[in-house]
Amino acid sequence: KKITVTVIKADVGGFVGHTSVHPELLEKARGVLSGSPLLIDFHVTSVGDDINLIMTHELGRNNGEIHKLAWDTFVACTEVAKKLKLYGAGQDLLADAFSGNIKGLGPGVAEMEVEERESEPIVIFMADKTEPGAWNLPLYKIFADPFNTIGLVIDPKMHCGFTFEVRDLIENKKIMFNAPEDIYDMLVFIGAPGRYAIKRIFHRETGQIAAVSSVQRLNLIAGRYIGKDDPVCIVRCQSGYPAVGEVLEPFAHPHLVSGWMRGSHSGPLMPVSLKDARPSRFDGPPRVVALGFQLADGKLIGPQDLFDDPAFDRAREMANLIADYLRRLGPFEPHRLHLDEMEYTTMPMVMQKLKDRFIDLRLAKAQKAQKEKGGA
Ligand code: 13P
Ligand code: 13P
Ligand code: MG
Ligand code: MG
Ligand code: MG
């Protein structure tokens, strides 16, 4: 029997501002999902201002009914958000109506279909105030770096390595890389997480799915800047896959990700428990939560709030130090993102206003030379 784990997330209104989700929305979401005969089990949670629907079923990936259920849930939550006048009600629902598959309509989706093993531990990562490429560095470390994952060296079932599916989010292309032999080539791409994002990872010997992330880019869908696509990622653990502790280990060192205030800043990704997943300082810094579940015939046994561990206190401290440092740079790069990555940019407006005050130096020089030639 194959079980599909589907995680679909959306921001349909923030409480207060962009910091969190109002409990009434979560209640509504639970109400809608519990009424559905399609699901084996579900868990509704939130990280920052994003609602995450974690669902299990037997209908496979890209199932229209499951996607519609998620869409209808978000629509129902949007009604509540509108009633409470929450901030940005319906923010991530870009289409007027559902049309077959939720991909491309705004919400983020990560799904994997698995033949449930004798024991099937999974970790679901959910981040707010960042983008899908934020998983590149940790996924690389988990599945390709022996300094992070000793299992790549000493577990005979992992020694063969993993295959990475990388997406070009601008040109909508994909390419497969095998670790370890292709890692130098792969890093050329995944080191640019604003454009190239790891979509899926497979076990090389079995071909089985190991990890999957949501890689939607809202602004490309909408054709305008409308916020970063706070991403989710599902990772299978143990017995041929990295141990839970190997999967969490990269987050002990908070790496810099794009997002934070107005989706236009670089900041450290802080690993937090659910209760601390309410980014407020400068709308951040970006947060990541890790929930662990054991699948049991599709039932979600859990969650275990995995960053609720004092062993991650130092990472949080380091993230706060990095945040202090970066905030001092104010509107300067590299705290503020590079121009073409900024979400709320005033550049065209300011440029238009000042266009007559710009002097073209090459033109001025040519005119001067012309004049001198004429005078001679
Ligand atoms: P235990 O001995 O606690 O089961 O741990 C085994 C293991 O693989 C830890 O990564
Ligand atoms: P969200 O993408 O989480 O809604 O954040 C947007 C924003 O502008 C934060 O300052
Ligand atoms: Mg928001
Ligand atoms: Mg968000
Ligand atoms: Mg967002």
Image: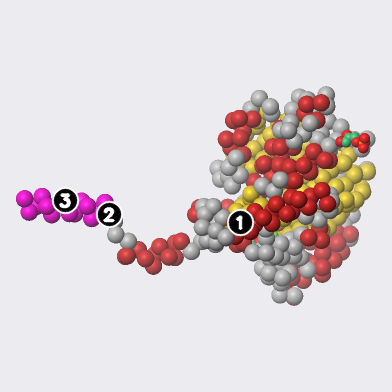
Is 72 on the left-hand or right-hand side of 199? right
Circles 1 and 3: CB distance less than 8 Å? no
Image: 245 above or below 17: above
Secondary structure at numbered mark 1: helix
Q: Residue at x 63, y 59 (%)?
A: 324
Q: Which residue position is annotated with label 3?
A: 369
Q: Residue 86's x, y, as percent?
A: 71, 72
Q: Which residue position is annotated with label 1?
A: 325
Task: Give amino acid for label 1.
Answer: Tyr
Mark closer to the chain start, 2 or 1: 1
Q: Residue at x 49, y 54 (%)?
A: 339
Q: Residue 183's x, y, as percent?
A: 64, 30
Farthest left residue in view: 376
* The N terminus lies in quadrant: top right
Q: Residue 237 or 112: which is nearer the viewer? A: 237
User: Separation of disc 2 and disc 1 at Cα?
Assistant: 37 Å
Q: Which residues are magenta?
A: 362-376
Q: Residue 364 or 71: which is nearer the viewer? A: 364
Mark 3 surroundings: few (<14), some (14-19) or many (≥20) residues within 10 A: few
Mark closer to the chain start, 1 or 3: 1
Task: Give amino acid for label 3.
Answer: Ala
Circles 3 and 2: CB distance less than 8 Å? no
Q: Which residue position is annotated with label 2?
A: 361
Task: Give amino acid for label 2.
Answer: Leu
Q: Quadrant of the rendered structure where residue 230 is? A: bottom right
Q: Tell me the chief SS of the magenta region.
A: helix
